Amino acid sequence: MAAPPEVTIHNLSGTWVMAQISGITKTYRLSNHPTQNKGLSDNMDELMELQGVPWLVRKAASVMNVTAKLTQTTDAATGTGSITIETVATGGFKGENKTYKLDGSELRSESKFGVTHVRARWLNLSERDQPRSMSGEGPSTPTWSRTGLRSLVYVVQESGEGTAEQVFGFCMIDGKRYHVQKTSATKDNKTVRVRAVYDWRGQ
């Protein structure tokens, strides 16, 4: 379902389910209530291939539902915000938990892709230099929702597998408001851009 008005870029805490890829209609069950989703997200296969994910894993991922539990907090002493994402796919397969500290500082983590350096900060839609994940946006592109100077979250991840830029925010799609994550990943002079759209499933 679309995000309720009280859920904003400053209050992302809750459970989100990635909308199925474009062109696919799929019925799945959550809390015993069947939900049909006609697909708003891009196909992630090319992105995963760029990241070195094996073919069999990519094919399995294409038919899985991905659920993300987000927890957003603010340090009372410093005012610095952070977002933690716990990802689970169909069958209980857990992804890598990620924490983004929204002050631009660099965090170092280790994963199956090796050592990754991550920086995250707030992004103002009026900034002159926009991320690559937002390039090519035009009149037909869903409009980002503005919430003052802190309208989006901007994440940069660098590793031996290349560089990925992500932008988190909210967009109006077909008259409904959804949480959207856009990614631009580059490796060996090749760049892939994808959009992931998330349905709100409550706290």
Image (tube, rainbow, N blue to C red):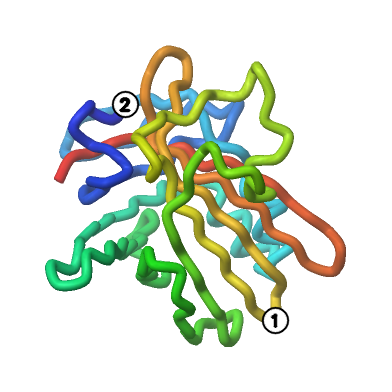
Q: Is residue 93 left or right of residue 130?
A: left
Mark 2 Cα within 10 Å, few/some/many (few <14, many 20+)? some
> Compared to 89, does 94 lie above or below?
below
Q: Which SS class for mark 1?
A: loop
Q: Residue furthest right?
A: 189
Can you tell which mark lies on residue 160?
1
Snapshot quadrant of residue 189: bottom right
Q: Position of residue 144 (x, y in %)?
A: 48, 30
Tell me the residue at 21%/71% (across/down). Answer: 78
**Do the residues bearing badges 2 and 1 touch, measured as CB atoms within 8 Å?**
no
Q: Position of residue 86 (x, y in %)?
A: 32, 64
Mark 1 Cα within 10 Å, few/some/many (few <14, many 20+)? few
The answer for how far apart the CA atoms under marks 2 and 1 are is 36 Å
Res 94 seen here: no
Q: Which residue is mark 2?
A: 2
Residue 126 or residue 49, whichever sits in front? 126
Res 50 seen here: yes
Q: Position of residue 37 (x, y in %)?
A: 42, 26
Tell me the residue at 38%/45% (across/down). Answer: 150
Q: Is residue 152 left or right of residue 61?
A: left
Tell me the residue at 40%/42% (across/down). Answer: 149
Q: Which SS class for mark 2?
A: loop
Task: Give the amino acid at mark 2.
Answer: Ala
Can you tell which mark lies on residue 14?
none
Residue 156 or residue 84, whichever sits in front? 156
Q: Position of residue 66 (x, y in %)?
A: 40, 51
Task: Give the amino acid at mark 1.
Answer: Gly
Q: Residue furthest top?
A: 175
